[in-house]
Image (cartoon, rainbow, N blue to C red):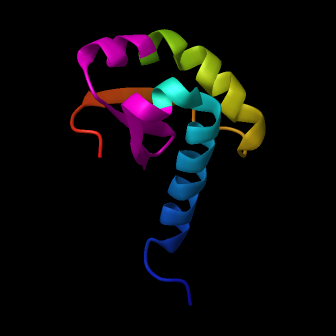
Amino acid sequence: MASIGGDRRAREQRVFAIYGDVGGEFLRKHSRPDALRDTTLIVRVSSSAIAHHLTLLRGEILRKMSPLLPPGMVVEIRTRVGTIE
């Protein structure tokens, strides 16, 4: 029997890994995927300027992620400003 939340966590980890691959070096350095809520990827960013930059790149990132994920798994990206570890 799978652990409670195991499927959700596995989906999250897959999305997080793909975000890291398609986001490029700059976004890997200044942002981290934080959570997957339904079809929205929540990304923690180091500053409001990075949040704005990510907002401008949202369409491109979603287009790059789309063929690597099941249809409709991620349809939106939202940002939160916070500490990047």
* Count of picture labels: 0
Which residue sits at x=62%, y=26%? 62
Residue 71 placement (x, y as % from top left): 72, 40
Q: Per the image, is 30 magenta?
A: yes
Task: Locate the N terminus by quadrant.
Answer: bottom right
Residue 73 visible, this angle: no
Apparent side of residue 63 relative to residue 51 in the rendered image (left or right): right
Apparent side of residue 66 relative to residue 55 in the rendered image (left or right): right
Magenta region: which residues?
28-53
Residue 74 placement (x, y as % from top left): 57, 37
Residue 63 placement (x, y as % from top left): 69, 23
Which residue sits at x=29%, y=40%? 84
Quarter where residue 64 is shown: top right
Which residue sits at x=30%, y=12%? 49
Residue 77 visible, this angle: yes
Which residue sits at x=75%, y=41%? 68
Q: Per the image, is 20 magenta?
A: no
Residue 4 placement (x, y as % from top left): 43, 78
Between residues 13 and 32, which one lies in front from this camera angle? Answer: 32
> Most extreme residue toward the bottom, as rendered?
1
> Most extreme residue toward the left, as rendered?
82
